[in-house]
Amino acid sequence: MADAQKPDQVPFRLPDPAEVGRSMADIAERSQRIVGEWLKRQSEEGGSSGADPLNIGGAFLEMTAKLMSNPAKLMQAQIGFWQDYMSLWQNTARRMMGMDSVTVIEGDPRDRRFRDDAWKENEVFDFIRQSYLLSARYVQDVVAHVDGLDPHTAQKVDFYARQFVDAMSPSNFLLTNPEVLRKTAETGGENLLRGLNNLLTDLERGKGQLRIKMTDMDAFRIGENIAVSPGKVVYQNDLMQLIQYAPNTETVLKRPLLIIPPWINKFYILDLRPKNSLVRWAVSQGHTVFMVSWVNPDERLAEKGFDDYMTEGVLDALSAIEAATGETDCNVIGYCLGGTLLGCTLAWMAAHDDTRIKSATFFVTLMDFRESGELNVFIDEEQIKMLEDKMNRRGYLEGSEMGTTFNMLRANDLIWSFVVNNYLLGNDPFPFDLLYWNSDSTRMPARMHSFYLRNMYQENLMIEPGGISLAGTPIDLRRITVPAYFLSTREDHIAPWRATYRGTQMLRGPNRFVLAASGHIAGVVNPPDGGKYSHWINRDLPPQPEQWFAGATEIAGSWWPDWHRWVSALDKRQVKARVPGDGKLAPIEDAPGSYVKVQAS
């Protein structure tokens, strides 16, 4: 780094006193109003559900008791920590005297928190960085090696210890972040005033709850510059609109393709922009694509259950596709929760001798919830009761609350990076379509969400024959015999691939499992032209996922062509391209429809 760029050598520009005075007066007025509105809302909603609704204190109390039962092990960890710390002091002192020194601890080169050159080139900030990394390693090692904790408590302790460690990173604070100090000197502190205004704006938008702005929300318009694949809404009911996309080939595969997205988020992640739209690509390959666009529910739909999503979602969509195309047979894709619903629906249909679904594709789908990743941290009786209390008062789970849960799984990327950028550096977030979609949250009906959390995540009843019943019918996944394609992603924090792999051992038809690189979104939305992310294939399906991976072959590029070859080989017949409105269903409105444009508060 050039000397002129070092934080301690940047000339400090004095701010305009009149501008500061106006800003502080506005900040004071807005702060008073936000606090008043938040207190009023808390009173109307019945206040807090308890001092520790997440039951974090109980988990850490149990961990402390276990640690104290083996003081020698704790002392050994402390001695190792202090030895490393003394080495850091000695090496920093040597460096300050111009002598050779060594780095005591190297951070992850992918850690973007410390990408500024000053973290290594300036001996003070290098000391701060390394002391933090040593402390973080010590805390995580201690909590990760406590004997005698039950698995759920151990997972909760580990998760919240990492949340604490991430929150205490020196990059998150003004006086220990060289980039922020440099910006403060260059702007005379105007970045901090702008950051405080950004913070208040986020609190105002969240009505007293912090809702971090991740992108320029005014840069995108659904149906104008995202979700723009041409098509028509050809059917709708209380829970969903069904979109039929316009063809761009003269002939198409005889079997239509139905996509069932999750209703935790909106469908247009699969139609974000033309260059990475799975919808547009599938249409170009000769599929007649139908997409379910779920409603963003309010209190009027509080009593809609999981079985309603099956009957009014999947089954109604299949009937509408038959009316629109004259075809009873269909290929169906389910994404995440949409895949869980697809699995349940197939089992229900098997019990009723309904054979309309001829192939099933499961994107990052859990059926066995035994090891469902870090989301399990939020699934215990105390937390479910807290959520049910909230949902019963409103009739739904607020979308922003669900979004916060998912963001915590990647806190450094989806929380703290924006705290630094928006509040400390005082920058406006960049326009980014994926983060716009991520912020466009949806609600969850109370009855449905309670059923999902208790029966799937908490009790894992979906894998038990007759463990759950939908629309009066006990379901059994072992009765599913249709060809199935399982697509999972190697770095998925929401649906870990080893857990999703178990679906191949439960369904009785010819199955294919493919593992893509990257995570829950980027590994799925990976177009062939993008040149990103490889995938692994293995025609064998041994009992354990590790065995599958040991025999798998890595293939460069997107998995999309592999899926198309698989699904089209099941039925290669072609028919004349189908235009929305040519069948028995008259178009209701243009794609992407109106349901997707309803935003949660």
Image: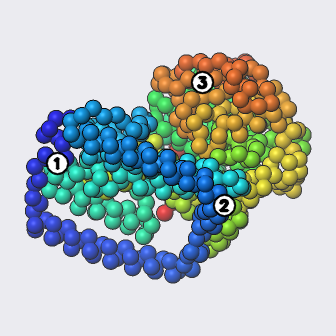
Q: How many marks?
A: 3
First in residue order: circle 3 vs circle 2: 2
Residue at image position (48%, 77%) is 41
Q: Residue tagged by mark 3?
A: 535
Q: Residue tagged by mark 1?
A: 8
Please name the amino acid that badge 1 sits on: Asp
Q: Give x and y (percent) for residue 330.
A: 74, 33
**Looking at the image, can residue 439 be seen?**
no
Please name the amino acid that badge 3 sits on: His
Label 3, secondary structure: give it. strand
Badge 2: how crowded within 10 Å, few (<14), some, or many (20+)?
few
Q: Residue tagged by mark 2?
A: 69
Residue at image position (64%, 53%) is 146
Q: Which mark is residue 375?
A: none
Label 1, secondary structure: give it. helix
Q: Give x and y (percent) for residue 402.
A: 56, 57
